[in-house]
Image: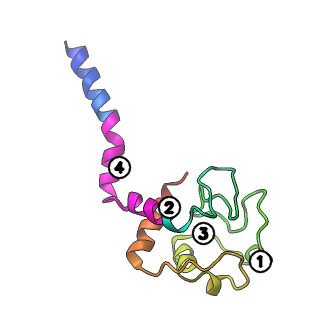
Amino acid sequence: MKANLLSSLILCSVLAAPLSAQAEDGGMTEAGRQIFNHNCTACHSLEPSKNTFGPSLIGVVERKAASMPRFAYSEAMKASGLTWTEDNLRKWISDNEALVPGTRMRHVSITDQAEQDYLISFLRSLK
């Protein structure tokens, strides 16, 4: 009986872990996923090695800009020297053309601070 109780408790803990992780960030990651789906999926993949019109965004946070293999970056992006820190991601999603003049990415203009927080939370979760 004790073994069954212990097994049940372990199973409940494992099943509840994703829910508690989502609750910890107050749903920010899920809100960010929705923003991503609305603004980014036409050009960016969530598969690690699948580049489309834009590069895959798996592992983008803290990644060096223009570093995804098999993607044809603009000369401007290659010369930018950027690392995708939270601060640089904010600048990029609010006005990418100001951050890297000559980039080929179309201007997205997500300027709302909360939406930026949500999107960055989602991007951070992509590993």
| Neighbour tally class for label 3: few under 14, some 14-19, many 20 plus, Cα within 10 Å | some
User: Was residue 20 drawn as part of the magenta stretch in this picture?
Assistant: yes
Q: Quadrant of the N terminus?
A: top left
The residue tagged 1 is 79
Q: CA distance from mark 1 to mark 2?
A: 29 Å
Q: Amino acid at mark 2?
A: Asn
| Picture disc at residue 58 | none
- Are discs 4 and 3 less than 8 Å apart at CB? no
Q: Position of residue 77 (x, y in %)?
A: 73, 75
Residue that appears at 70% across and 57% down: 51
The residue tagged 2 is 37
Of label 3 and label 2, which has the lower sequence position?
Answer: 2
Q: Where is residue 85, by image quadrant?
A: bottom right
Q: Position of residue 18 (x, y in %)?
A: 36, 44
Q: CA distance from mark 4 to mark 1?
A: 38 Å
Q: Where is residue 40, by image quadrant?
A: bottom right
The residue tagged 3 is 84
Q: CA distance from mark 4 to mark 2?
A: 21 Å
Of label 4 and label 1, which has the lower sequence position?
Answer: 4
Q: Position of residue 87 (x, y in %)?
A: 52, 76
Out of 30 and 21, give the one closest to the viewer.
30
SS class, disc 2: helix
SS class, disc 4: helix
Q: Position of residue 65 (x, y in %)?
A: 68, 68
**Residue, far left:** 1
| Neighbour tally class for label 2: few under 14, some 14-19, many 20 plus, Cα within 10 Å | few
